[in-house]
Image (cartoon, helix red, strand yellow):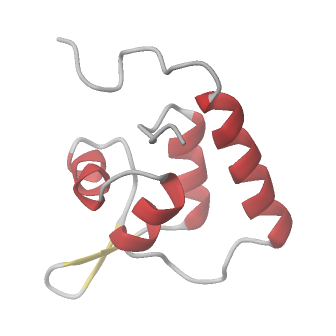
Amino acid sequence: MRNEYSYPEPDGVENRVAEEAAAYESEGLPNRLLNAREVAKFVGCHEETVRRAYWRGLLRSQRIGARGRRFHPADVLDWLRRGAPTKVA
């Protein structure tokens, strides 16, 4: 079964993702969990894409309260390295 994660990314996307992740790591990861909106903004995708990623088991999350989800920055960077869908700038 094919899904949106099985297609190769356009040229330059991997380099941009690696550069952004390196810049984010060099500034120091925040000492807090991120919500779906913050993850989507950092990755460069839609908030619903983040939700679908944790529903499919591609992105680890922690439950906060009855309906909330939070993401550890290291898990987000791991998701990026494994090929998270991002927008080409």
Front residue of 68/21: it is 21
State the residue lying farthest toward the right: 26
Front residue of 11/37: it is 11
Q: Quadrant of residue 16?
A: top right
Q: Quadrant of residue 81?
A: top right
Residue visible at 73% across and 62% down in the picture: 24
Report whether 75 appears left or right of 85. Answer: right
State the residue lying farthest toward the front: 89
Residue 45, compared with residue 62, is above or below; it is above
Expressed as whole percent of the image width and height from the top left, the position of residue 53 reads 30, 46
Numbered-mark total? 0
The N terminus sits in image quarter: top left
Residue visible at 70% across and 51% down in the picture: 20
Residue visible at 54% across and 42% down in the picture: 89
Residue visible at 85% across and 63% down in the picture: 26
Expressed as whole percent of the image width and height from the top left, the position of residue 78 reads 58, 45
Report whether 28 appears left or right of 29. Answer: right
Expressed as whole percent of the image width and height from the top left, the position of residue 52 reads 22, 48
Residue 73, compared with residue 21, is above or below; it is below
Residue 37, compared with residue 23, is above or below; it is below
Expressed as whole percent of the image width and height from the top left, the position of residue 76 reads 52, 55
